[in-house]
Amino acid sequence: MAKSMSVRNLNAWYGPQHTLKDISIDLDEKMATAIIGPSGCGKSTFIRCLNRMHETAPYAKVTGEVKLGDENLFDLDPVDVRRVVGMVFQKPNPFPTMSIFDNVAMGLKLGGIRKQSELRERVERALQMAALWNEVKDRLNRPATALSGGQQQRLCIARALAVEPDVLLMDEPASALDPISTMRVEELVEQLKNDYTVVIVTHNMQQAARVADRTAFFLSGELVEFGETTKIFTKPSDSRTEDYITGRFG
Ligand SMILES: Nc1ncnc2c1ncn2[C@@H]1O[C@H](COP(=O)(O)OP(=O)(O)OP(=O)(O)O)[C@@H](O)[C@H]1O
Ligand SMILES: [Mg+2]
């Protein structure tokens, strides 16, 4: 079930470096929100705060409030958070020694599902949703590493979806993909936002414009502007947003 995330005065540090400064933003359910901004502005750090991964980095610190639905994110067990707030990384990272099937089934098994028929059904459903089923249904026992980069990325998306998260965070999920795989991932985001809260980090402005309902522009750890994607790309209120989207810096 999709849940919203409501972020208030989020600050994050790596040691002395103040990386995120007072971020407040509402990530509404059944919406895709794009996070854009120049390299190093804190996009990955931001989404890593949302599934409690940031605090696992050495010397990392985070303050502020994040609500996941009605609950306080920082009061929950991080392991439980990661089950309901799924993450897809820039570089596909399937479990290399596992088969295609086991990559997707892993989270379900950890969640206590043992019945083979149920596992098969859930794995198929996740692979269908990630638009990979037709390409792999005859070789589910082959190693995940035998897939192409684009297929591995869709496998990682299937792995994240299999456990039916409430929120899906995607960190430049298509940056290493060819145009056809990129288009598939974009179509998938379109479809996923009917059921999930989707947050997608991207360097590709056209991609943000195509898939996101709302767009947030980050600069040097600050949220400069957040609003409807069409407004951000056609009538931004802040001149720094305009400079960035028109390619004057970043
Ligand atoms: N594990 C870490 N330890 C120390 N500093 C880090 C760590 N990860 C990121 N940083 C620093 O935090 C800042 C923000 O990094 P972050 O990865 O969030 O940027 P980004 O917007 O995702 O950039 P990119 O578009 O290049 O992926 C940068 O100055 C970076 O060097
Ligand atoms: Mg990043």
Image: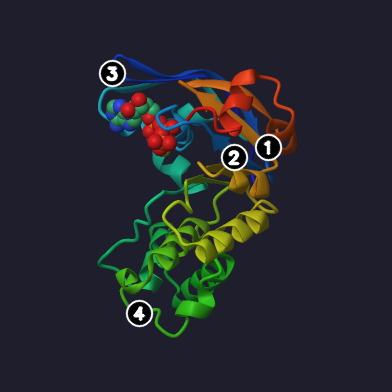
Residue 135 appears in the picture as rendered: yes
Residue located at (30% from left, 14% from top):
16
Which type of secondary structure does the marked residue at label 1 adopt? Answer: strand
- Few, some or many residues within 10 Å of mark 3 (<14, 14–19, 20+): few
Mark nearer the viewer, 4 or 2: 2
Residue tagged 3: 15
Q: Which mark is residue 214?
A: 1
Q: Amino acid at mark 2?
A: Ala
> Please, what secondary structure does the residue beneath circle 2 have?
strand
Marks 4/1: CA–CA distance: 39 Å
Which quadrant of the frame does ligand 2 lie within?
Answer: top left
**What's the residue type where badge 3 is placed?**
Gly
Q: How many marks?
A: 4
Classify mark 4: residues with Cα within 10 Å, few (<14), some (14-19) or many (20+).
few
Counting residues from the start of the chain, the first of labels 4 and 2 encountered is 2
- Whether tag 4 and tag 2 are in contact, CB under 8 A, the answer is no
Task: Specify which label sits upstream in the sequence, 4 or 1.
Answer: 4
Residue located at (68% from left, 42% from top):
29
Marker disc for residue 34: 2
